[in-house]
Amino acid sequence: MQKAGWQSPSNIALVKYWGKHGRQLPNNPSVSFTLNTAATRTFIAWENYNKFGRVELSFTLEGKENPAFAARIEKFLDSLVDEYFPFLKEVTLQIDSSNSFPHSSGIASSASGMSALALCLCEIEQTISGVTVDQDAFTKKASIISRLGSGSACRSIYPEMGLWGHHPDIAHSSDDYAIGIGAEIHPVFKTFHDDILIVSAKEKSVSSTAGHNLMVGNPYAEARYKQANERIITLLTALREGDLVTFGKITEDEALTLHALMMCSDPSYMLMEEGSLAIIKKVKAFRADTNIPLYFTLDAGPNVHLLYPHENELDVRSFITSELKPLCHEGKIIYDHVGQGAQKIM
Ligand code: DP6
């Protein structure tokens, strides 16, 4: 058997993707920091043999069989055969994934998991076809396949920051895949921290996919898409200039907008918990008291991401330990930072 292996990180959106159409196409552009520590490692052992002429795979998570994930991956790979990967009917795959973050951390692993899987598949395709495409074409295809698995996953593979979704004023932007924008950002953001405060490790009551669907019929949807298009331009300028105040304002407004959209969906729902709100209030008070540029964001769940420059690490860490850790589920925190994107590990 031959083997392919990739490690791919999670990411945290600053301008959020929320609402989609067609085959995993976003209703507005989004931009994210690529993380480092929260990552998935996936290995695929494969042989050029297939008895049934359809996708054949086994899947283990951390070495243990996981029928629920296996079924989800099989369905996903089935959907790729005709248009993207005809070779999947001719091989048998043994997929094993492991996450750097604990199962019970409440961290969504779809961005890291789907991007690691997509990269392995693109590599196997290249090996089987014997045609080596250039790095850009390889990455673009991996981003497309990641997106089909989970929208936000398409941004994870790039160093430092990814941008996904067409915007008329952003060159090379596309709804089909993300682009890397790390080269355009001010050095202060390249070493930014993202400490993930685990408020709850429970599974979300409403999945992201269901949440995206609830944007259909949300009375604020159109205004929201317009706002995201405007904010992304302002944010990109702040990212280039190292303007922390504008960065922080947009990032926090985006997190609250995302959760406000959930609260005014029909049916309405809430994913923030008491602990999330308590942390947000303390972060705002700490910033007002100290002038330290510490900001929060949220993904589609109760956990709070704390974003701040590397030079403020000591002050922020001691604030987290004394004031915020007691509000976390079992005191759990993942100390992460901006990372270098996906890596080949085999
Ligand atoms: C709030 O990418 O998880 O994290 O495409 O249905 O898999 P699917 O959704 P997903 O949605 C992520 C939503 C978000 C914002 C973001 O990452 O941009």
Image: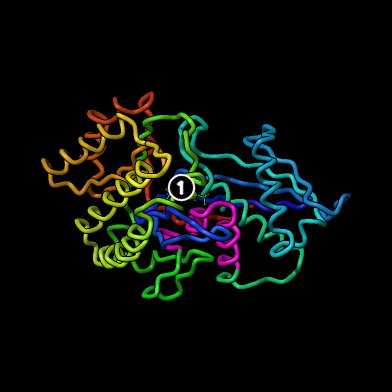
Q: Nearer the viewer, residue 145 or 222?
A: 222
Asked if residue 88 is positioned above or below residue 300 in the image, the reply reads below
Principal secondary structure, stretch drawn in magenta:
helix
Q: Is residue 163 magenta?
A: yes
Residue 91 location in percent, x, y?
80, 54
Q: Nearer the viewer, residue 205 or 322?
A: 205
Tell me what residue is drawn at x 58 percent, y 59 percent. 23
Q: Amino acid at mark 1?
A: Leu
Total numbered labels: 1
CA neighbours of label 1 inside 10 A, class few (<14), some (14 to 19), many (20+):
many
Tell me what residue is drawn at x 20 percent, y 49 percent. 293
Q: Which residues are magenta?
A: 138-164
Residue 191, quarter of the rendered image: bottom left
Kindly give the residue lying farthest to the left in the view shown: 289
What is the basis of the colouring in this image? rainbow
Q: Nearer the viewer, residue 14 or 263?
A: 263
Tell me what residue is drawn at x 42 percent, y 63 percent. 163
Kindly give the residue lying farthest to the right in the view shown: 51
Residue 34 location in percent, x, y?
43, 54
Asked if residue 223 is positioned above or below residue 131 in the image, the reply reads above
Asked which secondary structure carries label 1, the reply is loop
Residue 335 location in percent, x, y?
37, 39
Residue 265 location in percent, x, y?
39, 44
Residue behind mark 1 = 214
Q: Is residue 150 magenta?
A: yes
Tell me what residue is drawn at x 38 percent, y 56 percent. 221
In the image: residue 135, left or right of residue 186: right
In the image: residue 84, left or right of residue 268: right
Dot 1 beta carbon under 8 Å from ligand 1:
no
Q: Nearer the viewer, residue 321 or 147?
A: 147
Asked if residue 256 is positioned above or below residue 232 in the image, the reply reads above
